[in-house]
Image (cartoon, grey):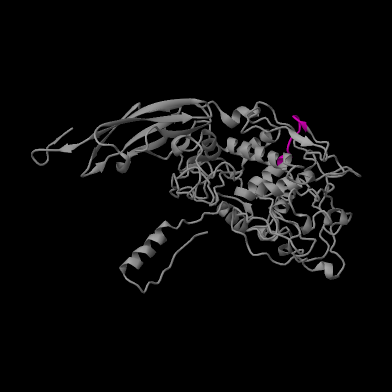
Amino acid sequence: MTNKVLARLHVGVLGLLVALAAAVLLPALGGAQQRGEAEEAATPTVGASSTPVATPVPQTEAVSGGCAFRQAPTTYEGPQDRSLYRSAVDLAAFNMLLPGDTYFGLPPLETGLRGSRTTSASASIPPALLKSIAWIESSFTQASQQVPYEAIGAALVSFDCGHGIMQVTSGMTTPLGERGYASPQQALVATHFAYNIARGTAILADKWNSAPEDRPIAGTDTGGDPAIVENWYFAVWGYNGFTGPGANRSNHPMDPIYGTWPRVGYSCGPSSDGLGHNRGNYPFQELIFGCASHPPQVSSVNLWTPQPADLPDLNDPRWREPLKLENFVYPYDKMDIPTPRQPAGGYRAAPATAASTPTPYPPGYTPPTPFSYPYAVPTPTPHPVSLVTPQVSSAPAGAVGHRDPTQKPSTALRASMFGAPGLSVSTSNIRISYSPETGAQSATLTISNTGTGILSWMAVPSASWVVPSPVAGVAVGPDLSCASSSPCERSATVTVSVDPTRLPPGTNQATLTILAPGIKRSYVVTVTTVAVIRIGVPGVTHN
């Protein structure tokens, strides 16, 4: 998405200057989905990289004002088969990625019904749901769409401050660290795929645990068991925004904008599979359940094993009544539903009565606060209302709901997600000359990873006149692959300059601390400015 200003002025020069200034300052909105949407629409079965590996890639990109970083940090984009990311999801789902971490670890999941909820430290999240969220939110990519696979470049930051694979927005909309810079947690979310996945997983768990105080419960007939995929219906809805009619992007399944029920199921697979591929036709949770059941493909191979996931049958009063729009009122205590399930023979359209037309908003219904969806939403198109072909169920006969068969991964897998990074900085002192006539020079330093894996780093100055660029990024070890001809400089170069408007007169000294939050290491660089004063014979200067 882009914002462009075209002004026709019939006033004087001042009006022209104002219009030109507005055109420059209006930010261009970048969608988190751009590479994914193009990849899905043009080549649902992906072969070669959608970005030519020889194309120059910017190391940093400007991001929306108000996000955690003024410029997108650098990051490493993994292989196109997403094998690195898929392994990280499996570990995160079973709380094996960063267990015990209060920010990145998986919290104990609640189970049970209203008035009888308990927590289980051993409960996990169905990995297929996390992989589906990753695909819908970012096409399972950590870097910007311009960055090829197996390369280093600008991290993915959407117009609403969603970051990386899981499009983490919560906690990423403003700098939370010292002196107006990002916090260590924000740097890890933006630069390192494993921390990004871990944080997105924790957010989904928080959405689950918000029931019943702030959200309804799915699974009133199955004890609200988190092992059942369908019981995550409301938590998945909430991951993208627990919104309804009147929002910028409603996720309510009975919102009239989605037409009649049933809907042809959504698919992330090839466009020839006979299912729906227009994201504007579906609320977020239907996108995720559909993508879990019909995963995307790379080189004609599914990225994960199809995971059946049934939706609430909106023609069955057991689900239709609780989900009526008039019940969409905080704290949503009238919206609890049984575990969603597909009726025998598949979902069928309701009888041709007045009920088959879109239901108007109920009298007195107040739409919720608008929510900004993280990507451009296509215009919905009508759905056929004939019988929807039933999906193949993996559940035993008589069972309610489906369970993700993904096995708990080996503990040894975790080591390959993080490696053993080491921090090295090329210098401990930087000297920058400055004169009122010519301004300030700049200097550079190099950050290297002396170990393996991804070293996430951030640069935090002690004074406002010290300006590092970029302020966060990665240095990559030799164990991670770089595609031929791809931009993949394993060491990071930081340019250090001076802001003359903030620089006090005379000689000044400050520090620039290079933090490696993932390994809890730091390195302090002293920055000295030397005023150059021009005296005597022209061309002769004295410091």
Q: Position of residue 200 (x, y in %)?
A: 63, 40
Total numbered circles: 0
* Residue 483 appears in view: no
Residue at the image position 80 percent from the left and 46 percent from the top: 218
- 479 inside magenta stretch: no
Left or right side of 282 for 535: left
* Residue 119 appears in view: yes
**Which of the 4 image quarters holds residue 104?**
top right
Q: Where 351 sits versus 98, above or below?
A: below
Residue farthest toward the bottom in the current orientation of the protein: 10
Q: Where 366 sits versus 77, above or below?
A: below
**Which of the 4 image quarters holds residue 134?**
top right
Left or right side of 282 for 66: left
Left or right side of 524 for 408: right
Q: Nearer the viewer, residue 423 or 102?
A: 102
**Which of the 4 image quarters holds residue 185?**
top right
Which region is colored magenta? 119-127
Q: Quadrant of the C terminus?
A: top left
Q: What type of secondary structure mainly makes up the magenta span?
A: loop
Residue farthest toward the front in the current orientation of the protein: 364
Q: Position of residue 529 (x, y in %)?
A: 27, 33
Q: Position of residue 113 (x, y in %)?
A: 83, 40
Residue at the image position 69 percent from the left and 50 percent from the top: 242
Q: Nearer the viewer, residue 140 or 200?
A: 200
Q: Position of residue 429 (x, y in %)?
A: 32, 27
Residue farthest toward the left in the current orientation of the protein: 537
Left or right side of 42 for 114: right
